[in-house]
Image: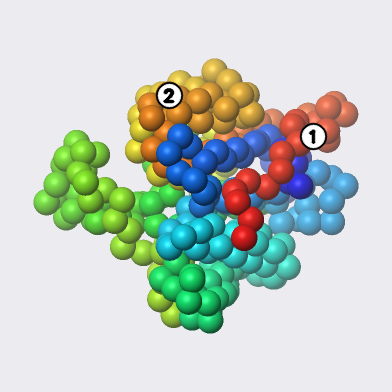
């Protein structure tokens, strides 16, 4: 079981920052299986892993009958475990984590015919030393709400997103395109993967809000609704409200979302208590 906690981050001479957060996942209204998996770790001062900081991940699997959930679970398990075991700067550690996850998924697909061709998106956010680090592949997204403005900080590895970047398609055309779910990069589909990894982190500010989600949410809920929801609600309630909005819009895919809020440190005992217990999401193979 993973717990949503508030964490004090010791940031050198700067005032300590805290992180509160929650992640939720739902199969949606149409799909039989939930191929999304979420995982997050928000250590408290009592945890031995406190120096590694906070961690959140969303993986959206793809493949044959139930194979997508196998891929996403392998990725989430491998990346989460290795992140807290490996030493080194976060970008190097994240690169090793995703490379190991890619190998594990690919080898499993080669040894099990029912999982042939499976793969998964993987978007990972690490908050450490007053800095955010992002690593991602596929079209699961990471957003940052700062100064009341929401912006996507990940880059979709999808066909329509590439066409938009190339100037061959507008954002509006991409949103309506029947090809919008064609992924150009994923974990496990090839012997090696090409995730995008931030080599330089983003300095954190008190008041920052990070949102991670699968395309089951971003395809049906617009950025303005995401921004308004995470601005007015605490993490658990914001996640639930965004899933409810997705289901109300049809819930045509599995949907996952996580909200992490950065704040000033707190001396109250409440800061070390769990905000809401939550089982790891997704269907376990």
Q: Position of residue 80 (x, y in %)?
A: 66, 60
In the picture shown, does residue 64 fall above or below 9?
below
Picture disc at residue 274: 1
Which residue is drawn at the image coordinates 35% and 38% (left, top)? 219
- Residue 147 lies, in percent from the top left, at 46, 27
* Count of numbered badges drawn on the protein: 2
Left or right of residue 128, residue 48 in this image:
right
Q: How is this picture coloured?
A: rainbow
Crowding near the residue tagged with mark 2, few <14, some 14–19, many ≥20 C-alpha atoms within 10 Å: few
> Quick check: can you spot residue 128?
yes
SS at mark 2 in the image: helix
Identify the image quadrant of residue 116.
bottom left
The quadrant in which residue 96 appears is bottom right
> Residue at coordinates 88% horizontally, 29% vertically from top-left?
269
**Height in image: 80 above or below 116?**
above
Residue at image position (64%, 29%) is 236
The numbered mark at residue 248 is 2
Point out the image quarter for the C terminus. bottom right
User: Residues at badges 1 and 2 in contact (C-beta under 8 Å)?
Assistant: no
Residue appearing at x 79%, y 56% in the figure: 49
Residue 142 visible, this angle: no
Residue 43 locus on image (x, y percent): 77, 47
Question: Of 217 and 270, which appears nearest the observer?
Answer: 217
Q: Residues within 10 Å of mark 1 (few under 14, many from 20)?
A: some
Question: Nearest the camera: 6 or 120?
Answer: 120
Q: Foreground: 116 or 84?
A: 116
Residue 243 image offset from top left, x and y in percent: 51, 30
* Dot in front, 1 or 2: 2
Determine the residue located farthest toward the top in the rendered image.
Answer: 232
Cα separation between marks 1 and 2: 30 Å
**Residue 158, numbered label:** none
Sequence-first disc among 1 and 2: 2
């Amino acid at each position: 079981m993973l717990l949503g906690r508030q964490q004090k981050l010791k940031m050198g001479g700067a005032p300590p920052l805290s992180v509160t957060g929650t992640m939720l996942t739902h199969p949606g209204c149409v799909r039989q299986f939930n191929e999304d998996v979420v995982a997050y770790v928000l250590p408290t001062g009592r945890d031995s892993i406190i120096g590694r900081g906070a961690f959140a991940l969303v993986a959206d699997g793809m493949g044959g009958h139930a194979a997508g959930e196998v891929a996403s679970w392998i990725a989430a398990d491998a990346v989460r475990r290795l992140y807290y075991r490996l030493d080194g700067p976060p970008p190097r550690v994240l690169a090793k984590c995703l490379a190991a996850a890619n190998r594990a998924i690919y080898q499993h697909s080669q040894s099990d015919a029912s999982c042939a061709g499976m793969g998964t998106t993987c978007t990972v956010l690490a908050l450490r030393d007053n800095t955010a680090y992002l690593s991602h592949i596929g079209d699961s997204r990471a957003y940052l709400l700062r100064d009341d403005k929401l912006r996507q900080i990940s880059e979709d590895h999808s066909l329509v997103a590439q066409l938009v970047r190339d100037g061959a398609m507008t954002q509006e055309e991409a949103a309506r395109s029947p090809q919008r779910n064609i992924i150009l990069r994923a974990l496990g589909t090839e012997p090696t993967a090409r995730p995008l990894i931030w080599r330089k982190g983003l300095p954190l500010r008190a008041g920052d809000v990070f949102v991670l989600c699968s395309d089951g949410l971003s395809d049906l809920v617009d950025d303005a609704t995401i921004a308004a929801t995470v601005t007015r609600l605490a993490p658990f309630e914001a996640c639930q409200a965004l899933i409810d909005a997705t289901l109300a819009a049809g819930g045509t895919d599995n949907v996952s979302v996580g909200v992490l809020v950065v704040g000033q440190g707190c001396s109250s005992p409440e800061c070390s208590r769990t905000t809401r217990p939550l089982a790891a999401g997704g269907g376990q193979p």
